[in-house]
Amino acid sequence: MDYAHDGMIKIHILYKVGIICIMLIIIIVRNILMKTITAREAHKKLGLVLDEAQYEPVSISKNGRPYSVVVSARWYEEIKALEALHVDAKWDRLFATQESESLLGKMAQQARQDLSTDDVLPYDPATQDKA
């Protein structure tokens, strides 16, 4: 039984989940503070929109509704990395669950072997104390 390995897997998963949570908080804060412009304005000032997107995402609305978001290449790569971490964390949880189930199965098998029929005392009602 390798409890240390199981514990390390759980710590690794918690670490990845923590990173994902921090990155999601950053995304939420950036979205709250995001500048919004109309599609017409973005068309007229594309150069300025691209420059501003280097520092923060710029939301473009069309007909009064959010339509697109312009982000820097660096920000886009961060989002892709976050998605990869999220997928990795899902796989880690799946494998940790499978390893835990496998460990429990091995423990149950060992317990069955330890309790062979020779170790079990026969039940004899005549020898039981009557209350």
Image (cartoon, rainbow, N blue to C red):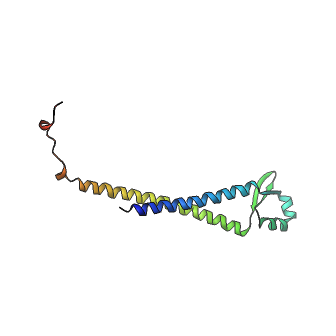
Q: Quick check: 118 above or below 92? A: above
Image coordinates of residue 103 in percent, x first then y, are: 37, 58
Most extreme residue toward the left, as rendered? Answer: 126
Residue 89 image-quadrant placement: bottom right
Q: Nearer the viewer, residue 30 or 80?
A: 30
Q: Nearer the viewer, residue 112 or 59?
A: 112
Q: Residue at x 61, y 62 (%)?
A: 83
Q: Nearer the viewer, residue 69 or 74?
A: 74
- Describe residue 28's horizontal placement relative to residue 46 as left or right: left
Image coordinates of residue 78 in percent, x first then y, are: 66, 66
Image coordinates of residue 123 in percent, x first then y, are: 16, 42
Is residue 128 shown to the viewer in this render? yes
- Describe residue 58's horizontal placement relative to residue 104 as left or right: right
Image coordinates of residue 6 in percent, x first then y, are: 43, 61
- Describe residue 46's horizontal placement relative to residue 32 as left or right: right
- Describe residue 86's horizontal placement relative to residue 8 as left or right: right
Residue 62 image-quadrant placement: bottom right
Q: Residue at x 36, y 55 (%)?
A: 104
Is residue 91 shown to the viewer in this render? no
Give the position of the N terminus as an image quadrant. Answer: bottom left
Give the position of the C terminus as an image quadrant. Answer: top left
Most extreme residue toward the right, as rendered? Answer: 44
Q: Residue at x 24, y 55 (%)?
A: 114
Q: Nearer the viewer, residue 63 or 76?
A: 76
